[in-house]
Image: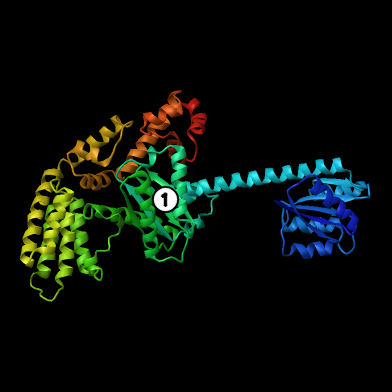
């Protein structure tokens, strides 16, 4: 329903207009005022879509009323009616962008035609507004997608100078949803809509945006600033139940800390991604970061946290000597201390064991879990030390073996991706081809190329897509399958997010240039 205001100092004239509006069943809530002054007072607390006003009235005439209404809202439709067939009035009405000028007495047919034209204008305006909002929403999601894929905000601000980037500050928290299967691109357009509806139903009381990062990951960005972390962890649990019940897939959720500014979005996303590395340590846990019940009240001290980071960095950089040094320093620190909580020490060295095991392929989920269980059951600290050194020896040996061949392994993976771009390229498959553990391959690939594997695969697929669009006449549906997307709608959506335009538009702009 739209709102219409009839303004005339003669009640009979207002009644005629009301009668005709009802007769032709026009979709209006009808309001009335007996002069321009009363109309302006009414509009202080009400908004309208259409103004029908007499020209000659006491206090404030129709022309002044229209001018002041136009100043309040540029999209209100204005219709004048008067008994004065005067060109001066008509000319002035046109300068106020009035939709028509009707003479009294009002002729029903003329009135009906005029109001139909007014409604048509309103619907055109609404459609333009919807398209503008849709484009605005698309552009925001495109920018978010670029930010989450490591594009610096300052670069995007130059590329999209017409966009107000303050919208990034609206977000207060994130939830990363990850599936080890290639799931999100297997859904049809209808299934995607149903899935969005299910998630939306769970998150009915929150304002959020959803970004498809890759076939394995989706990000939810929330605009609510009143909820505590525990509320979002419960939300993640509710979504997990929906996905598990309906699709029977294994999903993991990583829930962020509070986002202070838009500039923090990328760093917090990277932290969420790292939290998921712990699923190797906690295979039956689906919400991260893990709150271990045995050490809920403990956090690592600054010095211990630095040593843990040194161990992790030395593994990533394949530096055997630095790894041995960092492990040695941590063990020596607590060898002679008898006052430290044994629960804290077990937690600390289970972290070390987890890091060391990531580089050793023989440690499957089950085996490393058993080793970690030992950390919590061994009676003496020297037993824990011995276990740590055993695993350290295997990790150091692996570093020696892999140090000189890691670049070759990455090249093997890159070539396999290029040669099998139309196939499933899961991390497990690629790790098997390179004879590496999935976790180690993921870390090494990022270190060698500067990209995560999922992002690299997507870039290769998008680059191949551009080539096929530019140099061939193959259908978009065929190209989608040729570059590894089973769902055409998901493929088109990813292309639009990646390049800011549809495949069809890209082909139109670039095929002749090939």
Q: Is residue 487 above or below residue 393?
A: above
Query: Which residue is the extreme one toward the top?
Result: 473
Question: Foreground: 396 or 220?
Answer: 220
Which secondary structure, mark 1?
helix
The residue that label 1 is drawn on is: 147
In the rendering, at what x and y percent does residue 273 appear? 31, 53
> What count of labels does the image hold?
1
In this rendering, does residue 408 appear at all? no
- Where residue 385 appears, as percent x and y from the top left, is 8, 62
Q: Nearer the viewer, residue 218 or 14?
A: 14
Identity of the residue drawn at 7% across and 67% down: 379
In the displayed structure, does residue 268 sit left or right of residue 206?
left
Residue 32: image quadrant is bottom right
Q: Position of residue 512 (x, y in %)?
A: 50, 25
With respect to residue 419, does 135 lie above or below? Answer: below
Q: Quadrant of the C terminus?
A: top left
Q: Residue at x 49, y 57 (%)?
A: 207
Which residue ends up furthest to the bottom in the rendered image?
339
């Amino acid at each position: 329903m739209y709102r219409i205001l009839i303004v005339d100092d003669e009640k009979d004239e207002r009644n005629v207009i009301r009668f005709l509006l009802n007769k032709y069943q026009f979709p209006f809530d009808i309001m009335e005022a007996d002069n321009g002054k009363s109309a302006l007072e009414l509009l202080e607390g009400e908004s309208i879509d259409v103004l029908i006003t007499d020209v000659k009235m006491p206090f404030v005439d129709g022309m002044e009323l229209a001018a002041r209404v136009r100043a309040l809202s540029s999209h209100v439709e204005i219709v004048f009616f008067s008994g004065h067939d005067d060109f001066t009035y008509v000319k002035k009405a046109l300068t106020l962008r009035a939709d028509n000028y009707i003479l009294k007495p009002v002729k029903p047919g003329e009135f009906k035609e005029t109001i139909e034209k007014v409604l048509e204008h309103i619907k055109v305006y609404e459609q333009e507004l919807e398209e503008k909002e849709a484009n605005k929403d698309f552009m925001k999601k495109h920018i978010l997608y670029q930010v989450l894929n490591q594009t610096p905000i300052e670069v995007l601000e130059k590329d999209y100078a017409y966009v107000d980037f303050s919208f990034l500050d609206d977000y207060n928290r994130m939830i990363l949803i990850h599936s080890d299967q290639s799931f999100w691109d297997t859904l049809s357009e209808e299934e995607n809509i149903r899935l969005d509806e299910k998630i939306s139903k769970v998150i009915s009381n929150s304002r959020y945006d959803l970004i498809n990062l890759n076939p394995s990951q989706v990000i939810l960005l929330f605009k609510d600033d009143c909820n505590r972390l525990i509320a979002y962890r419960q939300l993640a649990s509710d979504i997990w139940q929906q996905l598990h019940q309906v699709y029977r897939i294994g999903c993991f959720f990583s829930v962020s800390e509070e986002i202070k500014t838009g500039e923090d979005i990328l760093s917090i996303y990277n932290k969420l991604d790292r939290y998921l590395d712990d699923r190797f340590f906690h295979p039956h846990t689906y919400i991260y970061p893990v709150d271990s019940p045995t050490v809920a009240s403990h956090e690592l001290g600054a010095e211990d946290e630095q040593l843990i980071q040194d161990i992790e960095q030395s593994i990533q950089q394949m530096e055997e000597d630095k790894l041995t040094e960092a492990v040695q320093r941590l063990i020596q620190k607590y060898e002679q201390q008898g006052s430290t909580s044994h629960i804290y020490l077990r937690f600390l060295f289970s972290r070390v064991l987890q890091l060391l095991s990531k580089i050793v392929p023989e440690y499957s989920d089950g085996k490393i879990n058993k080793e970690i269980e030992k950390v919590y059951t061994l009676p003496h600290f020297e037993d824990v030390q011995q276990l740590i050194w055993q695993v350290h020896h295997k990790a150091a040996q692996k570093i020696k073996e892999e140090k000189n061949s890691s670049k070759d392994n990455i090249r093997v993976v890159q070539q396999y991706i290029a040669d099998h771009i139309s196939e499933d390229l899961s991390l497990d498959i690629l790790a098997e081809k390179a004879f590496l553990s999935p976790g180690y391959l993921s870390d090494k690939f990022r270190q060698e190329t500067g990209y995560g594997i999922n992002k690299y695969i997507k870039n290769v697929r998008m680059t191949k897509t551009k080539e096929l669009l530019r140099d061939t006449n193959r259908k978009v549906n065929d190209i989608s399958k040729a570059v590894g997307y089973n769902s055409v709608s998901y493929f088109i959506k990813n292309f639009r997010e990646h390049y800011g335009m549809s495949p069809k538009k890209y082909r139109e702009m670039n095929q002749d240039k090939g």
